[in-house]
Amino acid sequence: MGNQKRPCLMTFAKVDLLVLDEVGIQRGSSGEKVILNQVIDRRLSSMRPVGVLTNLNHEGLLDSLGARVIDRLQMDGGMWVNFDWGSYRKNVSHLRIVK
């Protein structure tokens, strides 16, 4: 890992709560998977919470992160919570004010 990435990785590992948003929209490179794996592994090893937000279903997230990471996220009571309602953006898009 490059020297520029190391301080960022350490910051992600140390904050009180880390929420990873839009997981699954990245390119899916092996480097990205390694970094996500390292961040999640370091946080869970130090008993720090991590939340993962995604529009993927369980199988899609499993494909994106890998079985090992999903298993670690569900360890010690980690849960998959499915929000299956429609898009909020579709309901409010007509309220936008165009200048």
Image: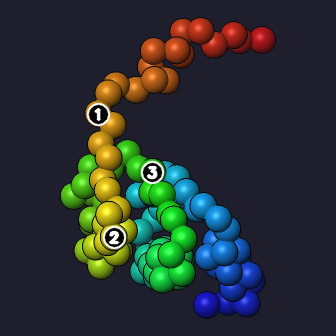
Q: What element carries label 3?
A: loop
**Which one is in front, 93 or 43?**
43
From the image, tell me which residue sits under label 1. Answer: 84
Instruction: Decide which of tag 2 and tag 1 comes sooner along the chain.
Output: 2
Q: How crowded is mark 2: few (under 14 residues within 10 Å), some or many (20 or more)?
A: few
Above or below, comparing residue 9 to residue 74 in the picture: below
| Left or right, 73 with reference to 15 | left
Q: Whole-Å distance between the Cαs marked 2 and 1?
A: 25 Å
The residue lying at 74 percent from left, 81 percent from top is 7
The residue that label 2 is drawn on is 76
96 shown above or below 34: above
Q: Where is residue 14 in the image (x, y as percent from the top left)?
A: 66, 75
Mark 3 Cα shell of 10 Å, populated few (<14), some (14-19), many (≥20): few
Quote the CA–CA distance across marks 3 and 1.
13 Å
Marked residue nearer the N-terminal end (3 or 2) = 3
Q: Do the residues bearing badges 3 and 2 touch, measured as CB atoms within 8 Å? A: no
Q: Mark 3 points at which residue?
A: 53
**How many discs appear?**
3
Q: Which colour scheme is used?
A: rainbow
Residue 57, horizontal then vertical, whole percent = 27, 49
Residue 67, compared with residue 90, is above or below; it is below
Please state which of the two labelled residues, at mark 2 or mark 1, is closer to the viewer. 2
